[in-house]
Image (spheres, helix red, strand yellow):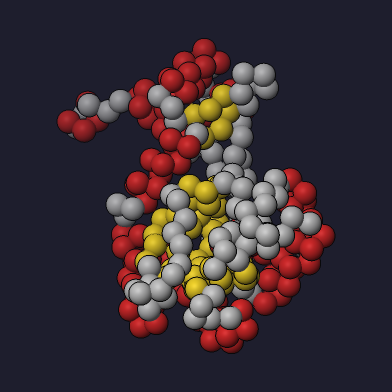
Amino acid sequence: MTKGKYYFSKSLEKGLSILTLFKKDTPVLTQSAIASTLGFNMTSTYRYINTLVEMGYLDKDARTKEIRPSINCLLMCVNLMQATDNLRMIKEVVDQIHSRHNISIDVAFTVNDTLVRIYHREAKETLTYSLPEFTRDCLHNTALGKAFLSSLTDDEIPQKIQSLDLVNKTSKTIVDQDVLLRQILLSKENGYAMQEEEYLQGVLAIAAPLIDPISGKGVGAVSFDFSVFEHTTDSIMKDYSELIRDTAGRLSKLLLSTDT
């Protein structure tokens, strides 16, 4: 037995194996499903799950017993992501575009209807805005969120819109489901989405979805953000629609070895 094998922790292995079960297609699991998938007995499964719940990495619904990753788990994943070569390459692409065009750029993943920002560059001497690290109730009122919605299938888009809490952030926020649906379908056709002072007055944004190269599904978006004092919606679409689509395509390719 090698020294590495001698110091191998089976308990840690089993705990981590539980966390790896949560994916885009399986965001919520039950104890029985976890035990069945991993071949653990129910007593051990309960112990590992309870430990992860107590540590704050899993949330367990007291009524339904459904289990899902917590915000703390999400934060840990973002921190790990920021330590990988994938983020370094994403930064290089974003930094090049930022340097060439002096525009504010945000890159974010979408997890359980929450935007998780992984990188931000701000334009010099211009009014823009910076999203928090985690932003909820924003898929309908940000360019990032709209771009992600446009990556869903035609059948999934109306279902997702119906499930959203259409929070009214400004007087221009779209809170009508039918209007939002038409806009998202147009964004899907165009390959980019627009936000016109719907999240914050005075700010316009254009975004395109990030697509997982393996599954072909949307995992987030990249956006360019502008001040209404320097740009109009028409000028942004004319000058930046091709660039945002190209940027999203380049960043999507970098996700090939990234488990989001």
| Residue 9 is at least partly visible in this image | yes
Does 250 sit above or below residue 260?
Answer: below
Residue 94 drawn at (x, y percent): 38, 71
Relative height, residue 103 to residue 74 (above, below): below
Residue extending farthest left: 3
What residue is shown at x 51% (from left), y 35% (from top)? 69
| 253 vs 152, nearest the viewer | 152
* Residue 239: image location, x then y, percent: 53, 86
Depth check: give the residue in front, 175 or 11: 175
Q: Residue at x 67, y 19 (%)?
A: 63
Q: Quadrant of residue 99?
A: bottom left
Residue extending farthest right:
178
- Residue 213 at least partly seen: no
Q: Residue at x 46, y 62 (%)?
A: 129
Count of marks, rendered view: 0
Q: Residue 206: image x %, image y %?
A: 56, 72
Horizontal side, residue 167 vs residue 259: left or right: right
Give the position of the N terminus as an image quadrant. Answer: top left
Locate residue 13, reporting x and y percent. Answer: 37, 30
Q: Quadrant of residue 140?
A: bottom right
Residue 238 in the figure: left or right of residue 94: right
What residue appears at the point 56 percent right and 33 percent down from the top-left corner?
A: 68
- Horizontal side of residue 212 vs 97, given as left or right: right
